[in-house]
Image (tube, helix red, strand yellow):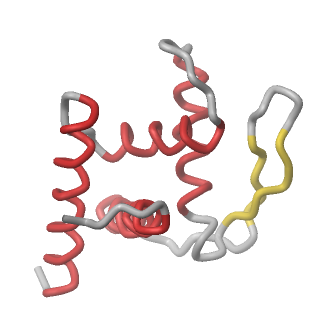
Amino acid sequence: MNTEETTLEQRWLALQRWLGQRFGREPDLNAVLFLIGIQETGFRRSSFSKEEKQDLMHVGVCTVLSAPGYYRLRHMDEEGWPHFELVKPLPPLQLEQQEQLLKQHVLHYFDQKGWSGS
């Protein structure tokens, strides 16, 4: 693992710990994307259907990949769901590389929201 990958992993573990303190357990990548989806939609319910959970994770993915220009918000529908469009194709990546790309941009998202990373 190179220095950049080590730093990314250290920051990711710090984010997981921070979220774990707030929510009672450390979330994996999918759970973090789900939380971002909830944050971005503003939905405040105690339960979601399986389809809604998948949609919220998709909102999380599109949100974090908007910063590097892969997605752009098109509009919000009447129910409050954001709709994104693909602006440029994602590079062909192995699964582990996809996870690293998402983690990097999730960390950027939290940095933009004021998370200190410590």
Asked where in the image residue 107 lies, by quadrant, the reply is: bottom left
What x and y, as percent, mark residue 117?
25, 66
What x and y, as percent, mark residue 51?
59, 21
What x and y, as percent, mark residue 33?
45, 45
- Quarter of the figure with the C terminus: bottom left
- Quarter of the figure with the N terminus: bottom left
30 or 20, nearer to the observer: 20
Q: Residue at x 30, y 66 (%)?
A: 116
Q: Residue at x 38, y 44 (%)?
A: 32
The tally of labels here is 0
Q: Residue at x 21, y 67 (%)?
A: 11
The answer to whether residue 71 is above or below residue 49 is below
* Left or right of 4 on screen, residue 86: right
What x and y, as percent, mark residue 41?
65, 37
Task: Pick out the residue farthest to the bottom.
Answer: 3
The answer to whether residue 4 is above or below residue 66 is below
Q: Residue at x 57, y 64 (%)?
A: 65
Asked where in the image residue 49 lies, by quadrant, the reply is: top right
* Left or right of 16 on screen, residue 108: right
The answer to whether residue 84 is above or below residue 46 is below
